[in-house]
Image: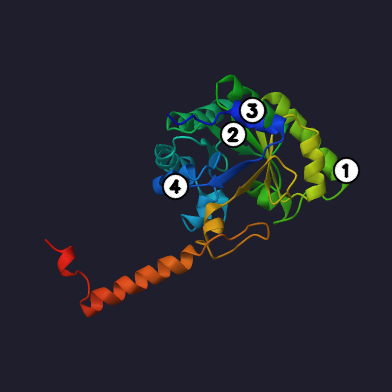
Amino acid sequence: MIKKVTVNNLQNLKNSGEKFSVLTAYDFSTAKYIDEAGIDVILIGDSLAMVALGYETTHAVGVEEMKIFTKAVAKGVKRAFVVTDMPFLSYHTDIPSAVKNCGEMIKLGANGVKIEGFSDYIVEVVKRLTASGIPVMAHLGFTPQFLNTLGGYKIQGKTQEAADKILSEAKQLEKAGAFSLVLEMVPQESAKYITENLSIPTISCGAGKYCDAQVLVSDDVFGKYSEFTPKFARKYGDMKALIFDCAKKFNEDVKNGNFPSENEIF
């Protein structure tokens, strides 16, 4: 029987100095394949707003859409820890609705949720979610849901003062019960400093190599999404070319009569 990854496993990896991997997935088959490949944490990222649904930002995706993708991904995973990215305004209005929305993802098969940003209210949300049995992955640095207030895609934590501010916020989220922390678009030196001063694992999203884990959007890794590729993403394949080539060949075979063949008919 395959042993399921838990928050305790991830904490133990941090404690022993071992790294772990995080990739996004939005559908059953992709989740199944990357789970079988040994990825430790699978994130149903709100990045699906752009790469799966064609929206311009993550703001447009809602709870009902995230529930559909969560259910599909969870069905494909046996080993990895599954985390749902809670969408914009799904946990901001009041604590009861935050607990309800996050709880729905757990009911559908997620093992935890990810929420962005910091405030006294967010700290209280983390406390209440944790007390309700919902593991929380926090997210600081550049937070896409706060794109408009941050003034664009800007690196965060570039000075000692700014790094100290992120660390202070991270410590409060850690104390509130967060089991891990994503650091996005933070200078490597700042991320190292924050990582060394936290007990919970940190996950780098363009925050250098000294975090306890690395996360990327799977469509960037597979070379499937070509509209925009972040500087920190590494392309391991060219699915765009593969999909284009297969579709082109099928189109040609249909039109010249080469499909179906005698072996493909009843």
Give the spatial CA distance, label 1 vs label 2.
30 Å
First in sequence, mark 3 or 1: give its number: 3
Residue identified by numbered label 1: 161
Secondary-structure class at tag 3:
helix
Tell me if 92 is positioned left or right of 141 in this view: left
Measured as percent of width and height from the top left, residue 59 is found at 56, 49
Residue identified by numbered label 2: 93
Query: How dense is the environment of label 3, judged by Cα within 10 Å: few (below 14), some, or many (20 and up)?
Result: many
Query: How dense is the environment of label 2, judged by Cα within 10 Å: few (below 14), some, or many (20 and up)?
Result: few
Query: How dense is the environment of label 1, judged by Cα within 10 Å: few (below 14), some, or many (20 and up)?
Result: few
Residue type at the position of mark 3: Val
Looking at the rendered image, the quarter that the N terminus falls into is top left
Give the spatial CA distance, label 1 vs label 4.
42 Å
Give the spatial CA distance, label 3 vs label 1.
25 Å
Residue type at the position of mark 2: Thr
Numbered tag placed on residue 262 in the rendering:
none
Name, please, the residue furthest toward the bottom. Answer: 256
The answer to which quarter of the image holds residue 136 is top right
Residue identified by numbered label 4: 33
Residue type at the position of mark 4: Tyr
Name, please, the residue furthest toward the top. Answer: 131
Give the spatial CA distance, label 2 vs label 3.
14 Å
First in sequence, mark 2 or 4: give its number: 4
Residue identified by numbered label 3: 126
The answer to which quarter of the image holds residue 160 is top right
Measured as percent of width and height from the top left, residue 230 is found at 64, 59
Secondary-structure class at tag 4:
helix
First in sequence, mark 1 or 4: give its number: 4
- Are circles 1 and 2 on residues that touch, CB within 8 Å? no
